[in-house]
Amino acid sequence: MANHKQIARSSMQEPKVRLVKNHRPKRRFNSKVFIDRTIETTAIISLLITGFSGVGAMACWGLEVIETNANPNIIISGWEQQKNICLGAMLVSFSAFLGSSLVGASLSIQRDKF
């Protein structure tokens, strides 16, 4: 045996046979696993974005309150626009979470054949 290869020799009638130890089978693309992982990743990312946007909206809301109490003559605040952007991002990412959860649930119901 040399270099993980073995040469089996038998009588003169049979040809030489080589056995290779390092043979790996090819991995096939599994679309079900890909779809499941994509849905799971979408759900996790959308929940994270929802959380961070919620924290940003709360921070902008607090700064808006502080700015309003500090100078009552200012009517239009820059923090209000930032707060609305964060709340919009929260809404979009949470609806993405709900959508991916609904798609994942419907696919699992189809696979289970209820």
Image (cartoon, rainbow, N blue to C red):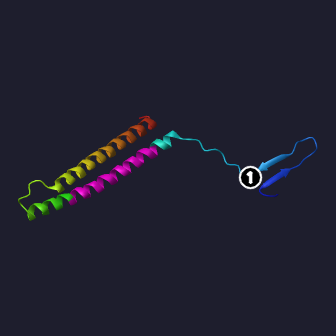
Residue at 35% x, 40% y is 102
Q: Which residues are magenta?
A: 36-59
Name the one closer to the observer, 2 or 59.
Answer: 59
Residue at 33% x, 46% y is 97
- The relative height of residue 93 versus residue 64 in the rendered view (above or below) is above
Residue at 39% x, 41% y is 104
Where is residue 51, by image quadrant? bottom left
Q: Position of residue 29 (x, y in %)?
A: 56, 41
81 sits left or right of 42 in the view: left
Give the quarter of the figure containing the C terminus. Answer: top left
Q: Position of residue 32 (x, y in %)?
A: 49, 40
Give the quarter of the figure containing the N terminus. Answer: bottom right
SS label for mark 1? loop
Residue 55 among those drawn in magenta: yes
Where is residue 25, by image quadrant? top right
50 sits left or right of 20 in the view: left
93 sits left or right of 36 in the view: left
The residue pinned by badge 1 equals 21
Q: Residue furthest left?
A: 73
Residue at 20% x, 58% y is 60
Q: Position of residue 103 (x, y in %)?
A: 38, 39
Q: Amino acid at mark 1?
A: Lys
Name the one closer to the observer, 80 or 111.
Answer: 80
Name the one closer to the observer, 52 or 82.
Answer: 82
Dot 1, how many residues are within 10 Å of its Cα: few (below 14), some (14-19), or many (20+)? few
Q: Position of residue 66 (x, y in %)?
A: 13, 63
- The relative height of residue 59 versus residue 14 in the rendered view (above or below) is below
Residue 33 among those drawn in magenta: no
